[in-house]
Amino acid sequence: MALSDMLYWAIGIAAIQAVYCQENFIKVECDPENQGVYSQDAVLNCKVVSIKKDIQIIKMMWCKVEADKCVAKTMVTFEDGKWSAEDARFSSGALEWNEKELNVSLLVQKTQVSDQGSYRFMISTDTGYEKGNTYLRVTAPYSVPVISSVPGINIEDSMPVTLTCNASGGYPPGQIHWFDQLDSNWTKSSALRTIPTQDGRFNLTSVFTTTASSSMALYKCVVVNDKMDKQRAEYQLAIGPGKQEGTKNIKAITAVFVVVGALASGILILYFHRRRSRDEIEKALEDGEDEKALNNS
Ligand SMILES: *[C@@H]1O[C@H](CO)[C@@H](O)[C@H](O)[C@H]1NC(C)=O
Ligand SMILES: *[C@@H]1O[C@H](CO)[C@@H](O)[C@H](O)[C@H]1NC(C)=O
Ligand SMILES: *[C@@H]1O[C@H](CO)[C@@H](O)[C@H](O)[C@H]1NC(C)=O
Ligand SMILES: *[C@@H]1O[C@H](CO)[C@@H](O)[C@H](O)[C@H]1NC(C)=O
């Protein structure tokens, strides 16, 4: 073998070794997805795995990635042995190597809807550079829904009634489903309005019009955010005048007295009338006017 050939192979092997070492001394493994809840703290986890001891860290960095670029205000950097952050809501802690593993996490405080997205962790060492990607999914629970009806009181059978179900401050945008007391699904007869709030969450308003029926007076609205989060409320239509207000009940009682009173005087009138008739019959019999007495009875 010629010297040039030997040199060729030697250089080739060295180059392969260098590439091999660079790409394999360290590896970054991240959870593919992390859950965050609005206004609470969220933690994003990655770990650096090394096959070589005594790795010198030159720089580490966390940031949110948009259009494949780091968002400057979300950057958290480790350099010269200490961490620094642009925004105090984002932080990370320097950790000790454990065996050949280094856990690095990004702590997001008071999580906002706008924090949802892709994040990247990068590490640069004396043996090479590596990065890992992870995702923060943010949810916000909706408030317990509130149902109101128009008209609200004194509803009569077969009257049209409009029910409104409101739930606020949730994320992602949810649905509102309607059911009656037999759990028949009335959602298709309702209209949903999704109103964005300033902080990226949503208010939901669903309007459902039905025909009042005293045998079907209970309705339910269910707010569906995702499979984990369901909020519900029930509403009983105020059908009948008795449901209106206290004075109505007093009037009803007065009416009963009036009816009872009328009945009583009727009985008295009837009694006196009968009594007079009987007196007349007796008088007629005494007078011997049989024909007149019979006609009168
Ligand atoms: C890193 O995290 C994993 C899983 O979360 C845990 O099992 C391991 O002990 C952690 N290592 C260190 C150095 O904290
Ligand atoms: C429900 O929300 C709508 C729209 O924001 C509002 O007009 C209505 O007053 C609310 N109703 C109740 C009972 O809160
Ligand atoms: C009710 O109807 C809505 C709209 O058609 C549908 O999305 C929902 O899954 C239904 N719910 C149940 C419990 O059947
Ligand atoms: C959303 O609902 C909350 C609570 O009812 C209310 O304070 C807020 O003004 C609503 N926001 C919008 C944009 O309608």
Image (cartoon, rainbow, N blue to C red):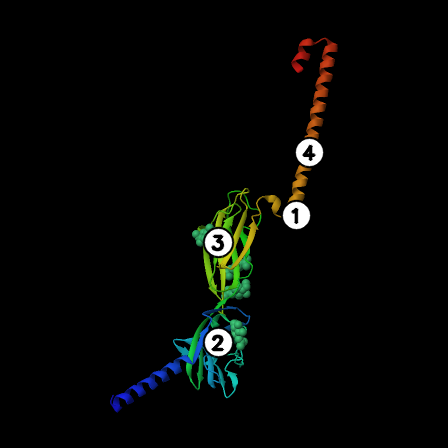
Residue 265 showing in the rendered view: yes
**Mark 2 residue CB less than 8 A from any atom of ligand 1:** yes
Inspect the image, locate mark 3, and give the three-letter code of the amino acid beneath it.
His
Q: Residues within 10 Å of mark 3 (few under 14, many from 20)?
A: many
**Mark 3 residue CB less than 8 A from any atom of ligand 3:** yes
Task: Tell me the residue that label 2 is attached to.
Answer: 47
Q: Residues within 10 Å of mark 4 (few under 14, many from 20)?
A: few
Of circles 4 and 1, the one toward us is: 1
Residue 118 showing in the rendered view: no
Of circles 1 and 3, the one toward us is: 3
Of circles 1 and 2, the one toward us is: 2
Inspect the image, locate mark 2, and give the three-letter code of the amino acid beneath it.
Lys
Task: Tell me the residue that label 3 is attached to.
Answer: 177
Q: Are marks 2 and 3 in contact (CB under 8 Å)?
A: no
Nearest to the observer: residue 34 or residue 195? 34
Q: Residues within 10 Å of mark 2 (few under 14, many from 20)?
A: some
Gap in Å between the C-alphas at discs 4 and 1? 22 Å
Gap in Å between the C-alphas at discs 2 and 3? 43 Å
Task: Kindly state the secondary structure of the residue where label 4 is placed.
Answer: helix
Nearest to the observer: residue 226 or residue 151? 226
Task: Tell me the residue that label 4 is attached to.
Answer: 260
Gap in Å between the C-alphas at discs 1 and 2? 68 Å
Nearest to the observer: residue 254 or residue 68? 68
Rendering quarter of residue 252? top right
Q: Residue furthest left?
A: 2
Closer to the chain start, of discs 4 and 1, is: 1
Task: Find residue 246 and name its label.
Answer: 1
Closer to the chain start, of discs 1 and 3, is: 3
